[in-house]
Image: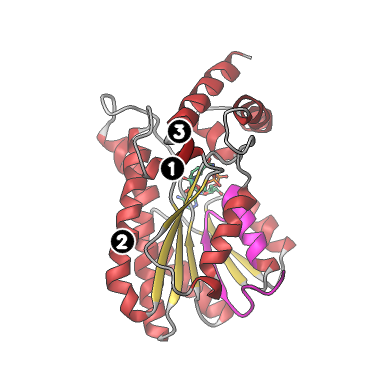
Amino acid sequence: MTGRLSGKVAVITGGASGIGLAASELFVSEGAKVVVADISDEAGEKLQARCEGSLVFQHTDVTEEGDIAAVVETAVREFGKLDVMYNNAGGSPDVHNLFELGSAAFDKTIALNTRAVVMGHKHAGLQFRKQGTGGSIVTTVSAAGMQGNAGEAAYAIAKHGVVGIIQQAVHEFGPHGIRSNGISPGTILTPLIGRTFGVAEDRIKDFNDFLDERSASWSPMRRLGRPIDIAEAALWFASDASTWVTGTVLPVDGGQTSAFGGRKFADIVIEAAEEFAKK
Ligand SMILES: NC(=O)c1ccc[n+]([C@@H]2O[C@H](COP(=O)([O-])OP(=O)(O)OC[C@H]3O[C@@H](n4cnc5c(N)ncnc54)[C@H](O)[C@@H]3O)[C@@H](O)[C@H]2O)c1
């Protein structure tokens, strides 16, 4: 199928890698004009060159409110309007349990995963209201936003906050025709997991293969997720196929949360990272 986002303009944060990269490429292939907002300049510039005319990369640190406002302005300047804001950038810069959690590390995790999503809602919301068109806001949450996550306190708390933002947006943005929905991915094979556990960049692919092999037999669908699995859900939320849907968080996790409350997979990831480090 093609053209599901024909005529739409989207901003995708964290669009230069993993889930965001898959979404950027899928959105373009479905007819959207896309502005990718990421701190990863090299990957962003390569992506812009590959999708010339349909995608613009802008260096954006989502922990800076001014950068988020600026990327919305770029979408309007380059492509005339904004229809979709995909708040996808995130990560786990601090892997500590609640006993060990420090204020500075906590603030950093909240700034990246929660405050950035608040500001993404605010600046996209202001633009949609000004246009009078409504719009769709999509956010990558996490299974860690639906329950505690062993050993990763700040990330779990930050992602729970995202669910709150989506609920708040229903009330304040709904009357303006603005929708807000989240996607809760299970374990997706991107560079993020390896980076979270300190795997060297040149070993990330090997780590993902190792993790995939270790986890597949536990997964209800007998595989881990791929970035495209999440990108397809984001596309649906972004498109006019979902105009009556707002305030939801959709698990896209191959049944991981349903089968084990997601916890089994957090354990598998931690064990695999420890074992891989010894290899
Ligand atoms: N991979 C998983 O298993 C998984 C599971 C649940 C949720 N998630 C969530 O999915 C989202 C995407 O993660 P991914 O797995 O694709 O990771 P990834 O590391 O492949 O991609 C994340 C992207 O975000 C960018 N980024 C990081 N900090 C940024 C900042 N301050 N400003 C702008 N861009 C920034 C990175 O440069 C990178 O391009 C995150 O919100 C993550 O929490 C991932």
Mark 3 or mark 2: which comes first in sequence?
2
SS of the residue under disc 3: helix
The C terminus lies in quadrant: top right
> Crowding at label 1, few (<14), some or many (≥20) Cα neighbours within 10 Å?
many
> Crowding at label 2, few (<14), some or many (≥20) Cα neighbours within 10 Å?
some
Do we see residue 56 in this rendering? yes
Mark 3 or mark 1: which comes first in sequence?
1
Residue, disc 3: 260
Report the amino acid beneath label 3. Answer: Phe
Q: Position of residue 4 (x, y in %)?
A: 64, 73
Residue nearer the viewer, 27 or 120: 27
Residue, disc 1: 143
Decide if residue 2 is on the left or right side of residue 197: right
Q: Which residues are magenta?
A: 1-27
Report the amino acid beneath label 2. Answer: Gln
Residue 147, located in which quarter of the rendered image? Answer: top left
Q: Position of residue 46 (x, y in %)?
A: 70, 56
In front: label 3 or label 2? 3
Ligand 1 within 8 A of label 1's CB? yes
Q: Is residue 10 magenta?
A: yes
In front: label 3 or label 1? 3
Which residue corresponds to the image point at 40% horizontal and 67% vertical from the top-left?
246
